[in-house]
Amino acid sequence: MKNIKIYAMCLLFAGMVTSSCKKEKSAELTSNLEEVVLDRSGWSATASSQETANPPATVLDGNTNTFWSSNATTAFPHWLLIDMKKQTVVTKIGLTTKQSDPKGFTKFRLEGSNDGTNFTIIGELVFNPAIYTEQAFTLSPARNVRYLKLTALEKAATQTGNITFLSEFSVTGLQERKPITDIALSKIGWTATASSEVNYPGDETNLAAYVVDVISAKSPTATTVPSFWQADYDVLHPYPHWIIVDMKKASSLSYIGLNAHTDPKQGFSKFSISGSVDGVAYTQLGDDRTFNPTTVNEQRFAVSPAAPVRYVKITLIEGTSYPCLANFEGYVKL
């Protein structure tokens, strides 16, 4: 996807009156639209004539092995009409000819309409029927239309009869940008290590690995609370404390999510986030963050690594004497 930036240009949309561009400014308009190859589901196609086995609807079926062909007894010009069912800002069309047949048409007229009756000429363009991949034609300026009409004006020199054909008719246009949603990555296979952890079998076990287990997991030695990592309370382990999550493959993270331990007396209040590709060289992802140890709800923190990262390092900077972390999530944009 890409942003559509319109430089020093006024687009006339049907039913809308736009003011003229001001020459004293280099206007840059970034809209909430994106340029995409449009979904042709529900569209229809009609033609000036057709061979029974090769109807016009085949130009919308996504199959280059099917094609529309005009009636062999009907003379040029031939036309093909695409109904997109609603007005759309069209920026480009794509045409694909019948495969392995270099005849067909070499020149066509493209027109647009909003009612299917009154058409405005967009241009007369040259088409090469000997190229079997899609040929793109940019509309400048873009046109806000419902119907597109292609009229084949001239046939290839090798074409002795009157028939013409077309395999595919695609349309690229502007549509409202779909919302981008942050989704949690699957943590299956993830591992975590830490600067220290509580690991006293038969007494208390609060391992680094517990931050990447499922959110519903319970502590093996305190089964009434969610599992959690706890830095060792030995005096030989003062702040800072760190925990590293290995996501096993690099991802372009948008957020991380952290859950505190249910006991705020075992929390931390300030930390930093770093990312790494190789687990050796880490880059801090933004400023130090504050954390609220009194809430058990997930707290999300935006990150924007310059490149995808595999390892995420959480460094605890300030907090209680027994800092804990219950859960880690990684989010990406979808």
Image (cartoon, rainbow, N blue to C red):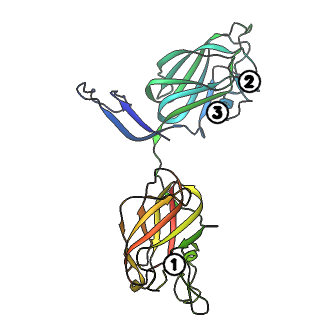
- Residue identifier under label 2: 99
Query: What kind of residue is marked 2?
Result: Gln
Foreground residue among 315 and 128: 315
Q: Nearer the viewer, mark 3 or mark 1?
A: 1
Secondary element at tag 1: loop
User: Which residue lies under the disc numbered 3?
Assistant: 60
Q: Tell me which numbered mark, 3 or 1, is placed earlier along the sequence.
A: 3
Location of residue 186 with respect to 82 vertically, above or below: below
Q: Nearer the viewer, residue 159 or 317?
A: 317
Question: As drawn, is 94 to the left or to the right of 119?
Answer: right
Q: Residue 148: where, in percent of width, then height?
A: 53, 26
Q: Position of residue 172 (x, y in %)?
A: 53, 33
Real-space CA distance between mark 3 and mark 1, rounded to the nearest whole angstrom = 61 Å
Q: Residue at x 63, y 19 (%)?
A: 48
Location of residue 25 in the rendering, given as x and y in whole percent from the top left corner: 25, 29
Viewer-side residue, 237 vs 93: 237
Give the class, few, some or many, for how many residues have Cα within 10 Å of label 2's Cα (few <14, many ≥20): some
**Dot 3, how many residues are within 10 Å of its Cα: few (below 14), some (14-19), or many (20+)?**
many
